[in-house]
Image (cartoon, rainbow, N blue to C red):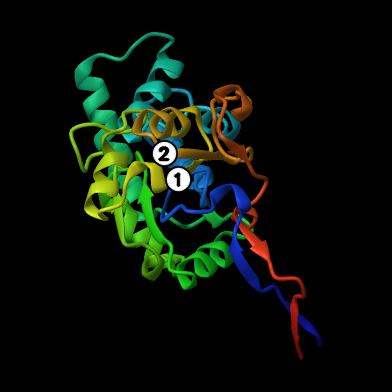
Amino acid sequence: MTVHSIRYSDLHSALQGKRLIAFDLDGTLIDSVPDLAAAVVHTLKTLELRAPSEAEVRDWVGNGAPVLVERALTWALQAPPAPALLARGYDIFMAYYGAAPHVHTTLYPGVEQALRALHQQGVTLALITNKPERFIEPLLHHFNLLTYFTLWVGGDSLDEKKPHPMPLLHAASRCQISPAECVMVGDSRHDIAAGKAAGFMTVALPYGYNHGEPIEDSHPDLVLSSLTELLMTAPHATRTA
């Protein structure tokens, strides 16, 4: 059997001179909705409330676990939940999701190849997500992505989370790289807003979670269909038997 191995020669021409690329996680690197939806359904059923479909949960993802639980409860109750109910729901959700965060979660096509190629080229990679920090390392370890990232920032790592620019500016400062030399890659308006506010170049992917809105409406600097488009291929792909 013949296997084709694509050889990457450089960054996409629009990214020349960029030294740090920060990635969102859910909806950008991984499709985590199946496991998040299972946790939401479990939470609502435990509270004896009606449960949503996976498609409905998909539109609620993107602002972190507390907001996801609040949106789910508001949908089920048709009204904002009382603080005590919200706290109980969050505890139920975190316990269930924390026990099984990657049963049905998958990598999007091209993710591992792109991260490996960028890492080999010496680009500094960071992960900036609104997911609670405790879940980041287990997920990266499960998908064998840990070695590619210099640092990661969760939604509860700092005082602010996306769309606030603080996590992005924190990553740039920790890596001693100017924001003008940085890129934010994500799938939602929160990623793009954070990137613009931090002075990063913004790159959007249309396949993730953006509350049912076209990502083009957020006016990113660049829209790509796959992470592999962050790189240019060499004139001739290598072929190995």
Q: Residues within 10 Å of mark 1 (few under 14, many from 20)?
A: many
**Whole-percent x, y for residue 172 in the image:** 29, 48
Q: Quadrant of the N terminus?
A: bottom right
**The furthest residue to the bottom:** 241
| Residue type of the residue flagged with mark 2 | Phe
In this view, the residue in front, 75 or 194, is 194
- Where on the picture, by quarter, is residue 119? bottom left
**Whole-percent x, y for residue 140 in the image:** 39, 62
**Whole-percent x, y for residue 148 in the image:** 41, 66
Q: Earlier in the sequence, mark 1 or mark 2?
A: 1
**Tag shown at residue 200:** 2
Secondary element under disc 2, as helix, strand or loop, is: loop
**Whole-percent x, y for residue 80 in the image:** 34, 11
What count of labels does the image hold?
2
At 57% from the left and 39% from the top, the residue drawn is 208
**The furthest residue to the right:** 1
In this view, the residue in front, 220 or 97, is 220
The reply, left or right, for residue 27 in relation to residue 160 is right
Q: CA distance from mark 1 to mark 2?
A: 5 Å
Secondary element under disc 1, as helix, strand or loop, is: strand
**Tag shown at residue 82:** none
Q: Quadrant of the C terminus?
A: bottom right
The reply, left or right, for residue 94 in relation to residue 118 is left
| Residue type of the residue flagged with mark 1 | Val
The reply, left or right, for residue 46 in relation to residue 187 is left
Evaluate if marks 1 and 2 touch, with contact meaning CB atoms under 8 Å apart.
yes
In this view, the residue in front, 123 or 136, is 123
At 22% from the left and 52% from the top, the residue drawn is 174
At 53% from the left and 53% from the top, the residue drawn is 16
**The furthest residue to the top:** 79
Q: Say which residue label 1 marks.
A: 183
- As drawn, 116 above or below 216: below
